[in-house]
Image (spheres, grey):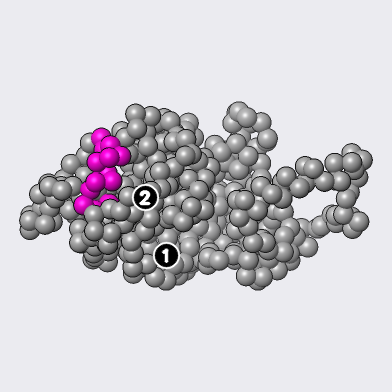
Amino acid sequence: MAHLPNSPAAATGHRVSPSPRSSPSLPLRKSVLLSIGAATGPPSWSWRGAAAAVARATTGSDKAAVAGTIINPNDVRVLSLSEVAERLETFQASGARNQNYMAMYSSIFGGITTDPSAMVIPIDDHMVHRGHGVFDTAAIMDGHLYELEQHLDRFLRSALMAKIPLPFDRSTIRSILIQTVSASKCTQGSLRYWLSVGPGDFQLSSSGCANPALYAVVIESPSIQVPAGCKVMTSSIPIKSPQFAVMKSVNYLPNALTKVEGEENGAFTGIWLDDEGFVAEGSNMNVGFVTAGKELLMPRFDTILSGCTAKRVLTLAEQLVADGRLSGIISRNVSVQEGKAAGEMMLIGSGILVKPVVQWDDQIIGSGQEGPIAQALYDLIFEDMRSGPPSVRIPVPY
């Protein structure tokens, strides 16, 4: 594992906080490897295709290979650090990634890089091999961070529940996140950030990890999709227990499988039910309904993730109550039967804002078209992102 030198300030007039631990002085490099696997780009992939490939691999002639031999006739090369850096740059240039990564902060090397080929983390970080980490996000709209304070509060609550000590205090973490966005020059996109117990070994316990690690990445996203009606399905993937559902940990395999299951069945995503059979949440979004009595109805947050966007929508929805488009706002248990009989259904999250649902399993929701309340809530949250109060919009000093 390589320890990285502190990088210079990412932008003129902004100072990045130092690494929480000192590291030996190394020659300054543009890109640095912590741990990677070389690749030329991912092939096309599907769940069923991967399963078939695994089946072929376990029944093929490779099973007869002598232990310790290399099946590929070409030996695997041992690469120098400079060769690895070159291959990382080649991988980045290949177009294998379908998002633009504008900047990354890492407390491991104590600074910000704007080179995507250097945006790597140690493979012995316990967030990688044990899932001992938490994360959160914030949207970037017109050069402002939206609801950073609210997301950061949840981030720190998640860290406390996951028993991850903080490498810096809250104000320093906040400053690092804003400086990372500033260095990225990105005015439209998203900021994602992670807190891990850190690298150190491949053990289960984090006692061998010297320091927690903070990472942040800025992802460019030039446009927000116009809300279009979608289909959802009841997920067959077991929901996470409340202890883990209420924290935003990196253990998102159940979430990912719920999303994949939905897509494989022609749906946008899956909908989880709780242990009592009530509606819980989507794969990474909250669920809302408009009842026949024009109430905005959401499941309670006590056993699911407390969505920052969903909570903001509930606040903004008071405007629809005031003008008579809604009769009230309520949060309680919602049965599947009640949900499917609703006049409108919607998914709510920071990545989609408000997305109408027009079909759940075989049941058409309402008229089968995008409903007026979902559209009104989308308009409210979108406008809030563009011109809301300082409590939800933080200007980025580019």
Front one among 349 and 59: 59
Rendering coords of residue 226 (x, y %): 33, 68
Front one among 192 and 53: 53
Q: Circle 2 — which element?
A: loop
Residue at 80 percent across and 43 percent down: it is 59
Amino acid type indicated by mark 2: Asp
Q: Are discs 2 and 1 less than 8 Å apart at CB?
A: no
Q: For residue 39, which numbered disc appears in the image?
A: none
Residue at 59 percent across and 31 percent down: it is 206
Q: For residue 189, which numbered disc appears in the image?
A: 1
- Horizontally, residue 384 falls left or right of residue 50, namely left
2 vs 1, front mark: 2
> Is residue 337 located in the magenta-colored stretch of the structure?
yes
- Horizontally, residue 5 falls left or right of residue 302, namely right
| Mark 2 to mark 1 CA distance (whole Å) | 35 Å
| Image quadrant assignment for residue 278 | top left
> Is residue 153 located in the magenta-colored stretch of the structure?
no
Residue that label 2 marks:
362
Front one among 287 and 380: 287
Amino acid type indicated by mark 1: Gly
Rendering coords of residue 191 (x, y %): 44, 57
Residue at 32 percent across and 64 percent down: it is 227
Task: Name the N-terminal-most of marks 2 and 1.
Answer: 1
Magenta range: 333-349
Residue 14 appears in the picture as rendered? no
* The residue positioned farthest toward the front in the image shown: 362
Residue at 60 percent across and 43 percent down: it is 128
Rendering coords of residue 256 (x, y %): 51, 47
| Image quadrant assignment for residue 392 | bottom left
Q: Circle 1 — which element?
A: strand
Rendering coords of residue 36 (x, y %): 70, 53
